Image: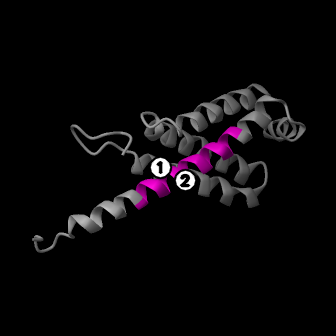
Amino acid sequence: MTTPGRPPTATVRPRRQLLTGALWCLQVLLAAVFISVAVAKLSGAPSSVQTFDSIGLGQWLRYLTGAVELAGGVGLLVPRLATLAGLGMACVMVGASVANLLVLAPAMTLVTILLGVASVVVAVGRWPTGPGSSASR
């Protein structure tokens, strides 16, 4: 028997499983993007070096950004760290959006904004909902 106003349990469980699967797909995709970009920055790819020369704050920022993106990409794959990693990567994407808009390529701002929004979706989707909740939903 179902309670009025509440969907039957049989339909809630598949929906939750579908959302969990979609969230994991998003996390893996974001992790792949952030890790690949981090490797390019940390390995000294000429395009990365040139980009950070254009920003004008020095190559230390390239190394810092690469390390943060690598940590965030790995963190997105660890259930206990996914919320924090999503929030951190959203913050990094705010900085990247500002740099793109003001100094680099304004057309790339949309990409960094979308990556930031996707990172927020992961953070919200993995946010613990209360006592006894599992961070790995």
70 or 56: which is nearer to us? 70
Q: Which residue matches tag 2?
A: 26
Q: Quadrant of residue 49?
A: top right
Q: Secondary structure at mark 2?
A: helix
Q: Residue 85: give x, y in percent of width and height.
A: 51, 37
Mark 2 Cα shell of 10 Å, populated few (<14), some (14-19), many (≥20): some
Q: Looking at the picture, which amino acid does disc 2 mark? A: Leu
Residue visible at 54% across and 45% down in the picture: 90
Q: Considering only order in the chain, which callout, 2 or 1, is on the residue closer to the N terminus?
A: 2
The residue positioned 68% from the left and 28% from the top of the image is: 64
Q: Do tag 1 and tag 2 residues touch (Cβ < 8 Å)?
A: yes
Q: CA distance from mark 1 to mark 2?
A: 7 Å
- Residue 43 in percent (x, y) is at 82, 29
Residue in the image at 90% along x and 37% along y: 46
Q: In percent of the image, x 50 and y 43: which residue is there?
A: 86
> Toward which corner of the image does residue 1 lie, by quadrant?
bottom left
Q: Which residue is mark 1?
A: 122
Residue 21 rendering spot, x and y as whole percentages: 46, 55
Q: Nearer the viewer, residue 95 or 4?
A: 4
User: Which segment did they paint magenta?
Assistant: 18-35
Q: Is residue 83 left or right of residue 93?
A: left
Q: Residue furthest bottom?
A: 4
